[in-house]
Image (cartoon, rainbow, N blue to C red):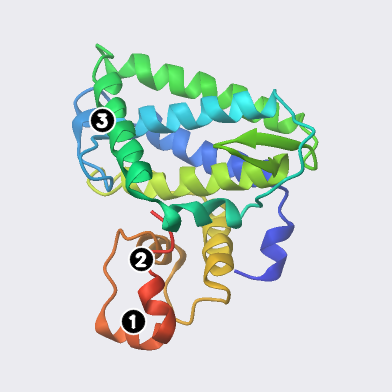
C-alpha cells in the first residue's frame, strides 16, 4: 500500500468493504450458513449477525453526534484490545455467547441475510451524508466520523476473511478494505511491517488468525512479541 491509498475517502473505503462483504453474504444459503469461520466457535450465520450489530452500531453513532473532543482515531481505536483486563475478556466471552444464541434464533438464514443487507444499506446512506470531521461516540470513545468509518471498514474486511475460511468459493474482500487494514496495522506497529506478506496474510497474522513462523519472528525482531496487534 502506498501513501496515496489513504487519500481514499472514508465513505468510499466503507462502501467498498461493506459492498464486498454483502456480495459474499448474498451467496450463502441456509445450509452453508452453518459452515465454520475463522472466529472460534462461530458459524457463518453467527459472524453475519455480529457484522449486523456492527452496522447497527454505525447507524447509532452516525445519527448521534457529540460535542466531545475525540480521544481516538482510526488507528488508536484498536489499542484497547491489548489492554483488556479479566473483566474485559469476560465481557468479550459473553458477547460471543450472545451472538451465537441470537443468531441461532433466526429460523431461516434468509431472514438474517435480508436484515443484514438492509442495515448495511442504511449505514452506507448515513455515511454518505455525515461530515467526516464530526465527532461521534462509540464503544466508550469519541472519534471523528471519518475515522469511525475506517474502523468499520477494517472490521468488515477482517471478518470477510473469516467468512471465507471454509466457504472458499465466496467473493473476497475489497482491495480498498485490505489496504485500510494494512494502514491500520502499520500504524499500530509504528512502521511498515518488514515481512513481505500480502494484505490478506498480514491481516491474519497481525490479528492472531495465523501463527508467526520462526523466520517471520526473526524478521520482526523486537516487535514479534507484540503480535497479535489486535484480535
Picture coordinates of residue 76, whole percent (x, y): 59, 56
Q: Which mark is residue 97?
A: 3
Q: Secondary structure at mark 2?
A: helix
Residue 189 percent coordinates (x, y) = 52, 71
Q: In the rendered structure, find residue 216 and report the number of the disc placed on it.
A: 1
SS label for mark 3: helix
Decide: marks 1, 2 in contact (CB < 8 A)?
Answer: yes
> In this view of the protein, which residue sits in the foreground, 219 or 178?
219
**Comes first in the chain, label 2 or label 3:** 3
Residue identified by numbered label 2: 205
Q: Nearer the viewer, mark 2 or mark 3?
A: 3
Q: Residue at x 47, y 48 (%)?
A: 157
- Residue 172 visible in image: no
Q: Nearer the viewer, mark 1 or mark 3?
A: 3
Q: Distance from label 2 to label 3 (Cα)? A: 25 Å
Q: Quadrant of residue 137?
A: top right
Residue 29 versus residue 228: which sits nearer the camera?
228
Does dot 1 land on a helix, a strand or a loop? helix
Who comes first in sequence, dot 1 or dot 2?
A: 2
Residue at mark 1 to residue at mark 3: CA–CA distance: 34 Å
* Whole-number angstrom distance, CA of label 1 to CA of label 2: 10 Å
Q: Which residue sits at x=36%, y=75%? A: 225
Upstream in the sequence, badge 1 or badge 3? 3
* Residue 114 location, quadrant: top left
* Image quadrant where one finds the N terminus: bottom right
Amino acid at each position: 500500500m502506498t501513501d496515496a491509498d489513504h487519500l481514499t475517502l472514508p465513505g468510499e473505503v466503507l462502501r467498498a468493504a461493506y459492498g464486498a462483504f454483502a456480495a459474499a453474504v448474498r451467496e450463502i444459503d441456509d445450509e452453508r450458513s452453518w459452515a465454520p469461520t475463522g472466529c472460534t466457535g462461530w458459524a457463518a450465520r453467527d459472524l453475519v449477525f455480529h457484522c449486523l450489530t456492527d452496522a447497527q452500531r454505525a447507524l447509532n453513532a452516525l445519527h448521534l453526534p457529540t460535542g466531545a473532543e475525540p480521544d481516538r482515531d482510526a488507528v488508536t481505536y484498536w489499542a484497547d484490545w491489548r489492554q483488556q483486563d479479566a473483566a474485559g475478556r469476560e465481557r468479550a466471552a459473553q458477547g460471543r455467547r450472545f451472538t451465537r444464541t441470537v443468531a441461532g434464533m433466526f429460523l431461516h438464514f434468509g431472514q438474517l441475510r435480508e436484515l443484514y443487507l438492509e442495515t448495511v444499506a442504511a449505514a452506507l446512506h448515513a455515511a454518505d451524508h455525515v461530515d467526516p470531521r464530526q465527532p461521534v461516540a462509540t464503544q466508550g470513545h469519541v472519534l471523528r466520523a471519518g475515522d469511525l468509518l475506517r474502523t468499520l471498514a477494517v472490521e468488515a474486511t477482517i471478518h470477510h476473511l473469516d467468512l471465507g475460511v471454509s466457504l472458499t468459493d465466496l467473493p473476497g474482500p475489497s482491495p480498498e478494505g485490505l489496504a485500510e487494514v494494512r494502514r491500520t496495522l502499520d500504524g499500530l506497529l509504528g512502521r511498515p511491517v518488514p515481512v513481505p506478506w500480502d494484505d490478506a496474510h498480514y491481516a491474519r497474522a497481525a490479528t492472531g488468525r495465523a501463527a508467526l513462523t520462526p523466520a517471520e519472528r526473526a524478521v520482526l525482531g523486537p516487535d514479534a512479541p507484540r503480535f497479535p496487534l489486535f484480535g
